[in-house]
Image: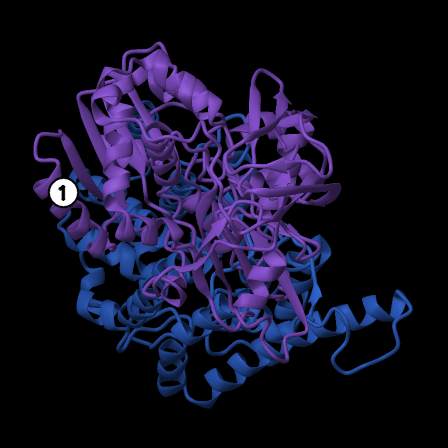
Chain colours: A blue, B purple
Amino acid sequence: MPKIVRKSAPHLRRPNASVTRMMRDVTIALLPLTAFAIYKFGLAALWIILMGIFAMAVTEYLYYQVLDLLEGESFKWRNKSFTLYNFSAITSGLIYSLTLPDNTPLFVVFLGGSLGMFLGKLVFGGMGQNIFNPAAVARVLVVINFGTMVSYDVDSVAGATALQMLSEGAFNPAVLDSFSIVNLFTGIGIPGSIGEVSALLIILGGAYLAFRTSFEVRIPLMFVGTVFLLTSAVAIYQGLGLWYPFYQIFSGGLMFGAVFMATDPITSPITKPARVYFGFALGFLTVIIRLFGAYPEGVVFAILIMNMFVPSFDYYKWTHSKFNKKRNIIFASVIVLSMIIVLVGVSYVG
Amino acid sequence: MIKKSRKVRDYKALTKALPTLRYLDPEYVYIHLNNARAKTYDLYVKEGDYVKLGEKIGVRHGGFFEQPIHATVSGVVGPITKKFHRTGRKVDVVEIRNDFKDTYHPSITDRPDHVIEQLSQEDMVDIIKDKSLVGLGGSGFPSYIKLGTKDPIHTVVINAVECEPYLSSDYRLILEHPNRVVKGLKYIMQALGAEKGIIAIKSEKDPLYEVLTQVLKVRFPDLHIEVAKLGNHYPQGWEIEVFKYALGIEIPHGVLPTKFGVIGFNVSTCVGIFDAIKHNLPVIKRHFTLTGDAINFPQNIRVRVGTSVRDLIKLSDGYKEGVEEVNIVMGGPMMGVSATSDDIIVSKTTTSVIVLKNTEYVEEPCVRCGSCVYSCPVSIEPVQIMNAVKRGDKDAMKGLQANKCIECGLCAYVCTSKIHVTDYVRKAKKLIG
């Protein structure tokens, strides 16, 4: 006669669904990019990647060890609040290190990763509680604090990365002489961060995640789509060809940020419509920062800024889990308005 | 996994294909005297009295209705004790010792068809009230109130979807007694003056479709009854969802379906109505599923109302060897109530008992994947309600419409972090009343 245990319904759970599976899938989706980075940048990339993962994982591990010791637990290698098994820290570390340039000093990689993990995730209470994407926080810390030590190793002919060129010589088709669209798409012969240069492999990783339903595909689609739409409007206004929007979406960290950073479920809104609006807002902010900001790259900043607004997307007074006609009309007018804002801005700058 | 996911693994293969076992002669039956809807009762018989099958032995008093209590065997009345009810509470039961003679009470006589044809809505409501028929799918709502509706009804829908995993008693019922289902529907349509009847089944249940269409074609060619194949998702069997898929009518929260001219009955209730009207019989037997992964011989059983589940578990060769902890669930595994003992009595509304191996799920922190929001059949946001409960924010619970929740359990089922979201939403419903 077995013991009878009382529980509340439902008594079944979905098989094969777990946080570990979701996070591990992101790591798997990043593997082709990692391989390409090591192939292209050699041992330097390997060391950066290992250091990035190490920095994040060790920070999280030590943090929870200290926390457990403070609560009077006895020391164990696999302690009570052990979290590394869920791949979350490893995934963040991998994403972070793939956004770095290949000549980043290793101590910078370590400091950025460790601080990013601590300030971006652990101080808020660990997984599920963080407001900012830890990888994005770490990346921004590196840009702001060690900006002079971290520069892109560009070849002497071009003298800049694709996006820097675009930022300096705004709206000049001459940029195509240095980097063709095909090269930008495949990442061959393009200087830049070790993991961000190949749009093709990023799309491959995204397709894998979409197939495994481990991320919300609407966010990257809206993000990239919005950038494409707004820069197309600029291209038409300035009389540029179709190369300009493609150049925008394939250069810099846009593809990588859209697929791997913006889609972190913890730092994105919870409903389908809000996720679509979130993706749009990310695209809009990226275009604004790229065209009018001081930095050539806007993706990471856009992600961090929008992370702050996630709670307001989910505020109970206006959150809805379904689209409806009225909200669609408002959203469409916001898109039109954003195009007007960008074009007015361009007419002043350009 | 971030996706809308309304497929629930159904485990019906355990019992679906097996013929229904008959276990109709327990030595004792126990008749519930009160239940969740009726708190007080009067008993007309005392210990030692002899009662006949179908005899009225008492009456339950509900808030707005009275329910006669019928003996389900003939025999001698025993003492009043307390046993578990489907709702998980202990209630009073009266024991009747079976004399194995099945002596029918004189009131149990068949009605000839020409008499039935003359019955009006009021007559049928009276019969059903007298036979104390309730929603046999598990709701326990008195059927005469539903049947006595004054709204004009054009379509009667028989809900045979049975979307809960593990259950297959309705499936077997239709497969083995399609005539009674169709005749019950015919009587309901006659009572309500409805032009059209629909029997709603899951699209994957092809044998039922073949059986029902064949019976309708051969035996009832002049009835306007259709068999509708609905989706295979959960909770397709929820009444509002049945109307939506079978008729394309979306009924808003808090509005009775009869306002739209449609009414739904569970298939067991429909058979109950047939028995009451044709044979003048109260519910004395029902199809019952005893299944689960911790029991040796999962099986559908036709049982006498009042049979002890403990006997039925013995009949199914008992619990599996080596299982240390089990959950005993009355009703489906998604919405059913779990008991603290196997000393349960099969009441009219007990569709099944499921014996599951107890699994302790490890809850991870919520990663806000949104699966519960995507999957929710009433389009609320379970995870946000959970967070509101955690911080005690009643305004947010109201604003997020926690009261719309039907407690289908899908949010906890799909949760990536294995969090018991449904429990939090239930708490929110209680808090905002």
Q: As drawn, is A22 to the left or to the right of A149?
A: left
Task: Classify the position of the N terminus of chain A by image quarter.
Answer: bottom right
Q: Is residue A172 visible?
A: no
Which residue, given by chain and number where applicable, does mark 1 sit on? A239
Q: What's the chain of the residue with tag 1?
A: A
For residue B211, side relative to residue A73 (left or right): left
In the picture as drawn, the residue positioned furthest to the bottom comes out as A43
The x, y position of residue B351, in whole percent, is 48, 47
Q: For the residue carrying disc 1, how many other residues have a C-alpha within 10 Å: few (<14), some (14-19), or many (20+)? A: few
**Depth check: A348 or B203 in front?**
B203
Q: Nearer the viewer, residue A23 or B247?
A: B247
Evaluate whether residue B339 shows in this view: yes
Residue at the top extreme, as displayed: B150
What residue type is disc 1 on?
Gly
Above/below status of B382 relative to A119? above
* Quadrant into which the C terminus of chain A falls: top left
Q: Secondary structure at mark 1?
A: loop
Q: Quarter of the image holding residue B51?
A: top right
The residue at the point 25 percent across, 54 percent down is B205
